Structures are given as structure tokens and as C-alpha cells.
Amino acid sequence: MRVLIKLKKLSNPKPVEISTKNTLYVREMAKLRAYFKLNPTERARTRPPFDKDVLDAQSVLQELKRIQHSKCAYCETILEHNPSRFVSHYRPLSNAFDPHQDAEHLECYAWFAYEWRNLMLICKDCDNHKLNFFPIAGRTAIALSSWRAAQLREMPLLLNPFEDNPSDHLMFDTDGVACSTSAAGKETINILNLNRPALCIKRKEQIGAGLKIILGNSNEHALREALREYTDHEVLHGGAVRNCLGHVCRILQTQIRHGRYSAHTDLIKKIIRLRNEFSVHDWEEAISRCKSNDLAFVIQNNELGELQPRRYAYINRIEIGRFKGVEHFTLDLDAGPTGQSRSETSCTMLLGENATGKSSILQAIALALMPSGERQRLRLDQKSIIPYGIDDTFMPPLQPAVTLRFSNGEAVAISMNLQTGRLKSVGSPHNVVFGYGSRRYFVLGKSTKAQTCPNRTLFNQAANLPDPTNWLLNLKEEKKFDAVARALASLLSLRAGEFVGRDDHSIFIQRHTSPLPIEHLSDGYKSLFAMAVDIMREMLKHWDSLEFAQGIVLIDEIENHLHPRWKMRVMRALRDSFPRVQFITSTHDPLCLRGMLEGEVQVLYRDRVGHLQRVEQLPNVANLRIEQILTSDYFGLATTEDPLRQHALEQLAKYAAHGDSDLTQTERRHRDDLLENYGSLPMIGDTLDRQIIAQALTRHIRDADIATPFEHASAREASVRAIIEVLERNRKKYGTR
């Protein structure tokens, strides 16, 4: 099925025939704009203009044919005739019908008639079923809005092979039946009738042939070559075959505790390895489970035993639009940093200056994951979500929207109706989420019943955590208290022989000498203790143990209340205590980056026009010293030196770029005084090479006040490159070293 493969249309420039370089295109677009200027009555009685000749250009047709491998974008049927017969649109050109709203919109989406991202080749069967259906989870796009604005506002529920990864939303069983794994997948199957009997029969034949090859051949080379005949992009239903074979592999992988093969491992390579690891009987048993009824059970049953780990997913992409001060921002979270163990969940640390938007991102995640009842208990001021500081002069205001995408391909989203102020959610997350604001104190003796929402402190700085000792003392199930004690021992790094205990009146750390009551801990210890126990209490409502408890925890300014020694340990301690929890946190303190792995730290900044951006290509934070972290692109400080010492270095760098004869007597005396007072500073300027370096250093220091981290990094790289180039020229010309 072609829809199983994300098509790479946007990686190449669009054909010139659908650009302003084509006069026919320009003329037709002018007609469309004129149409939307008509009065409502006239517009309602006139069809939007459309000239198919614009799309009949050979460059358009051949490029679509090449990208789609001459197959239908949705069902993978081979298109054997002139591609102009199959040109269609993702969004209909008029009378778009949303079955959820039971509403038809005449003008939607005429202005996308020649939009490259809206064009695709679709077989006649799919096109006849598709008609003018276009379900959305958000609000209908405003006429003449941009493609991106329409996507953000509408949150379409019909898969687009050019923008979505359809394999994240669909599964195929061994009978060739398509099953949905998301709301968008379900809508796509229903609208296009992708389980048409003829399609299922053909898919079953191709899938069966591929499975027969696997069962009958264990030779690596022969297996590889034979499988390509059924899994390549160009072959009939190659996407459906790959999808089904991948599901069989995932079933087999659940029997491997070490989880050896990642989701990114080449499918054929994975098949070859698993073919050698499992018997034909094991393969046949896994294949027997790939039936539509079993797939439906996998998708719908929350209590599935063996496959439960695959059900749960972690956030791997955050898309925020028009939320508070964040106009449009997408953040991809690293799912598997280098050196990370298989059992350890990927976490994320957000860095950025004040008012960058870190807290807004955490709040957006929490709101998208919360059940609607919990959002209501927050009593959130809906106006606080409405975007601020964003120019709406040239575009009608769009609704705030947040979409979270998960490692299993599922997604959840919320949007806010600007007129009613109501939040609307799409998708049903399996994840539990707990959010904590920058102030995480607890009130001694406060009952846990007072905590009506586990995310309250993230939205209300005046809110307190419940007293953890009350819950621990009243926890009747000894098994659960034991689970808490184990996690706390890991969190607090207790030594051998030390453990968390309780009596009728207190919670304490039992040491070799004497028990230490929790209330005697420092404020930093107690703050961390209260938050950790709060997480444990909520987790144990869903899980029997904390070692395998899964969820998402959001913590704003994690460094608050902590001693420097604890700042360096906090992330590692939390990860050890909750190994299956995805932590997404923020900080201003470089000490808190200890415990983060490569790719897990995201540096955010505002560009010159105020848009939220992230710094690319950061160094591996695990390999940097604290001083290096501060002066790297993570924090962007020019130096960690004392300001007076740094000023002395700047002055010496200027003097070192000149010989004694070029300096006045006053300048030479000032230089010598600096050297005497700051004798340990490196003196450069004795040789030509060092004078070049000094001159470059002077220029770099002068230009150090750069507006953004990206420009700062670029300036530093340019300075280093310039020094190397000059030194190389100098070496060739003068022979200096």
C-alpha cells in the first residue's frame, strides 16, 4: 500500500509550471484571488475557477510518477496509463465535507488547486471513494491561508503520504486487511475503503509469498535477494508487505529481553537475524498472531500481556502553534542517544534564557496529555493560553494548538476555540503525565486529598505539594511501600545497609548508627523527596512497581532548592529511580546537565524577530566539563573568568597584535602593568603566528555580543576557520610554524 510509505515530494523543488515562472499559473491564481473577493452571495452561486491545463504539464506529471513509483498514493495499485488520468488532490477543491461536523464548505480548498503539496496520483477506485471527504480535528482553514497555517489550524484526520508517516497509523495482517492504529488511520481506511475485497486478495497474495520465502529459506544472500522482489518500493503492495513482515518481527522481538533490534534497523536485515534466532515453528506462531482479530486486540486491549511494552510510547515530537508566546515551534526529541542503554528511557532537558518559552512548552505538553476532567479541575484561566506578542496584522488569528507525536506513531492534540475559550482534544493518550513547577514545596501535615490535580504546581506557583509523609504513613499495602522504599533508596543513593523505613509516627532513613527522620533533611533534600514521592504515589495508581512504571514527568527549573552536589546528581538519581519514565525538564544551571546523554539537551532561543528556535549540532554534553558547558553553545557565555581578569585579557590581546614599535610609551607601560598584575595570563604576540591569533582574538572579542546562540556559534566557527587559513598561508609563504 503506497500510503504505507512517506513520499518524499518536498525534498526536491516543485516544477516550474506550478510556480510564478509560468504565466498560466500566475493568471489562474489571480482568478482564484478575484473569486474570493466576490460578495458572499455571488461566491455562493459560482464555482471556484480551475484550469486542469496547469497540472497537465509533463514536468508535473512525471515528477509525481517518479516520486510515487507509478503507484496510487493510497492503495499501491500500479498506474499503467497516462498519469494525467490520475492527478488528484489531498484536499478537495470545493465542497469539502467534514463528517464529524456534518458540514460542507463550498470554497474549500480552491486556493490549493495548484499547490504542489496538495497534488498526488490516485487510482480511480480510491478517488471515487475519497470524493470530497476531508475530516479534521480542528477548525476549517481560512480562505487563502497558507498550507502550513491550514495544517496547524485544521489538524487533518486524512493521512497525507507526503507529510505523514502512514506506517505509524496503519497495520496489515496476513490476510491483507488494513487495521488502524490511530484516529487518522481509521478515517483513512474508512474514507478510501482500503479494505476493498480485491485489494485484500492481492495484498494477501504478496504478503503470503514473502512469508513463504522466509519460512523456506535461511540462506542470508538468497533470502535477501528474494525478499526484495516483494518489499521494494516499486513492486505491487510492497508497503503492505513490509508493514506486515515488520509486525511479525515485532512479535518475535517481544521474546527477546535485550530488545536487540531498534525500530530503525533495516527490515530485511532484521528478518535475516530473527530467522537465524527463531525456529520455523516460532515464525509460524508469530505469523498466526498477525490476523485482523488479533491486531484489533493488540490495538484496543489495554491489558495485553506480551505486547504491552509496544503499546506504551514516549513523546518523540512536539508541535506547538499559537500557544502563549510560542507562534510555531516543532521539537524532535532524540529517541536513542549514542551510548544509551536499551532499558533506559530517553529524557530531554530544555535550556534557554528567561522568557524563551521553556515553561510554556512544558505546560503545553501537560495540557495535551491531561484528561479533560483534570484540565477542568485546574481551573485554568483560558485567556492565559491565548498567544501574546504575535503579529496578526497580515493573517487572521489562528487557534492555539498542541500536537504530541509518540514513538509508536500515535498522536494526541488539543486546540482552543478563540470564541468560546474551550479546549478540544483529539486522541486518547495511554500516557500518564505529572507536571511540577519551579516551586515545589510541601506543607507539613497537608492531606493528599487536597491535591486534586497532580499537575497543579506547573500552572499555579502558589500551589503546594501534599505532605509525602502522610501518604507514606497511611499506605496500607506493604508491597507498595516496599516499592517506594526501593525507589527512594536509589534516589537518595543510600549506602549498603541503609533503607527507608517507617513506624507509627514518622518516615525515616535507617542508618547503621541511628534513624534519620525525613523532616530533619535539608530543604533541598525535602523538596526532591516530596516531588519524588508525589510521582510514586501517582504511578502506583497505574502500576504495581516503580521499576517498570511508565509515564511522562515534566519539571520546570529542576535546579531549584538543590545544593550544587545534588544538582549534579539529580537527573541521574531520577533516571535510576524511574528507569521507564520520560523526564522532560528545564534548567538554567549547567550542573543539572550531568546525567544527560548525547542528543538529550535542547538549547532554545529567540531569533531577531522573536521566533522560538533551537540550536543545532550541539557537542556531546557528557564529554564536557562544567566550564566548557558554560562557554559552549549550551549557555553561550564568552568566558567563566572574573570580569576584571577577562578585561585584562582583552587589553593584552589588543596589545599583543602589535609590536613594541607600534605602541606608544603609555600603551607599553599599561601592557607591562597588566602583565605584572595578571602574570598567569597567556601572553601572545611574540611571533607572527601568535600576533595573527591575537588579532583574530581581538576581533572575536569585539564581535562577541552576538544576538543569538546560532550567530554566536557561527561567529566562533568563522574565527577559528579564519585563523587556520591565515596560519596556513603564512606557513607556505614564510615557512613559519
Image (cartoon, rainbow, N blue to C red):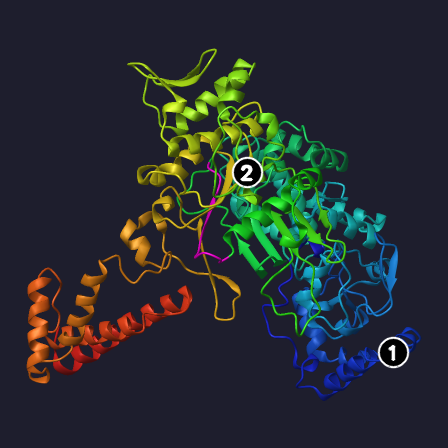
For this view, does 522 lie left or right of residue 305? left
Binning the other alpha carbons within 10 Å of mark 1 as few (below 14), some (14 to 19) or many (20 upward) gives few
**Residue 529 drawn at (x, y percent):** 44, 29
For this view, does 488 lie left or right of residue 19? left
Q: Main secondary structure of the magenta part?
A: loop
Say the numbered circle drawn on residue 185: none
Which residues lie in the magenta part?
344-356
> Relative to the observer, which residue lies in front, 82 or 263?
263
Q: Residue at x 54, y 40 (%)?
A: 457
> Which residue position holds label 1?
39
Dot 1 falls on a residue whose secondary structure is loop
So how many labels did they put on this image?
2
Dot 2 falls on a residue whose secondary structure is loop
The quadrant in which residue 116 appears is bottom right
> Relative to the observer, which residue lies in front, 325 or 341?
325
Q: Residue at x 46, y 37 (%)?
A: 344
**Residue 129 drawn at (x, y percent):** 86, 57
**Residue 263 drawn at (x, y percent):** 55, 45
Binning the other alpha carbons within 10 Å of mark 2 as few (below 14), some (14 to 19) or many (20 upward) gives some
Question: Type of residue at label 2?
Answer: Ala
Say the numbered circle drawn on residue 463: 2
For this view, does 51 lie left or right of residue 425? right
> Relative to the observer, which residue lies in front, 162 or 242?
162
**Residue 196 drawn at (x, y percent):** 84, 50
Q: Residue at x 72, y 40 (%)?
A: 174
Farthest top residue? 504
The quadrant in which residue 88 appears is bottom right
